[in-house]
Image (tube, grey):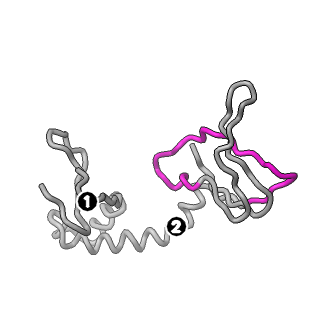
Amino acid sequence: GVETLFVVISGGLEEVLDGAHDSDTVLQKVRPGEVIGENFLDDSDPVWVTDLEVTTATATYLSLSKFDYHEAMKPHMENLYKERAVFLKAVVPFMSWSFEERLAIARLFEMQKYPSNLPIVKQGAVPNDFFVIVKGYCAV
């Protein structure tokens, strides 16, 4: 999957879709200051379906691995989890749980945003998730 984010410093890169019989298609040109691979932040583990090629004599870029990104974000995420644990104190069934128990479950929750009038769960579906509405309202 996509495991690296690239920031072009100098030179240029192209994202190329390999075609049959040397008929490659350039999907985008990546110039200095631009980024490619940002979908590595998604947990969906997307697969590179294109080639990334240097289009100038040389190219200089910064690269950041998904692992290093997550390591750097750990302190920030821990503060976020603590805020969620405090929020969960007001939510049944977590009201009687200790802070440590709520913190453990807060680390497992995934924040999602839904636009208005979009079903979160459809009638007849077998639920696999537990939802906590953090902001907004939900009609049942």
Callout 2 amino acid: Met
Residue 26 picture location, percent across and down? 68, 42
Instruction: Please give the residue where the numbered disc 2 appears in the rendered image.
Output: 73
Residues marked 2 and 1 touching at CB (< 8 Å):
no
Residue 103: quadrant of the picture? bottom left
Q: Looking at the picture, does residue 107 appear above or below residue 89?
A: above
Residue interval drawn in magenta: 38-61
On screen, residue 75 above or below 11:
below
Frontmost residue, 72 versus 99: 72
7 up-or-down from 135: above or below: above
Which residue is more in the foreground, 139 or 82? 139
Image coordinates for residue 95, horizontal then vertical, percent: 17, 70
Question: Any magenta on residue 60?
Answer: yes
Residue closest to the eye, 129 or 123: 123
Q: What residue is shown at x 30% (from left), y 61% (from top)?
A: 105
At horizontal 75% and vertical 64% (from top left) the residue drawn is 9
Q: Crowdedness of circle 2 by 10 Å Cα count: few (<14), some, many (20+)?
A: few
139 relative position to 71: left or right: left
Residue 118 x, y percent position in the rendering: 25, 53
Q: Residue at x 23, y 55 (%)?
A: 117
Left or right: residue 48 versus residue 95 is right
Q: Quadrant of the C terminus?
A: bottom left
Provide the residue designation for mark 1.
116
Can residue 41 be found in the magenta stretch?
yes
**Most distant residue in the right direction:** 57
Residue for point 19% across, 40% down: 126
Q: Which of marks 1 and 2 precedes in the sequence?
A: 2
| Quadrant, the N terminus | top right
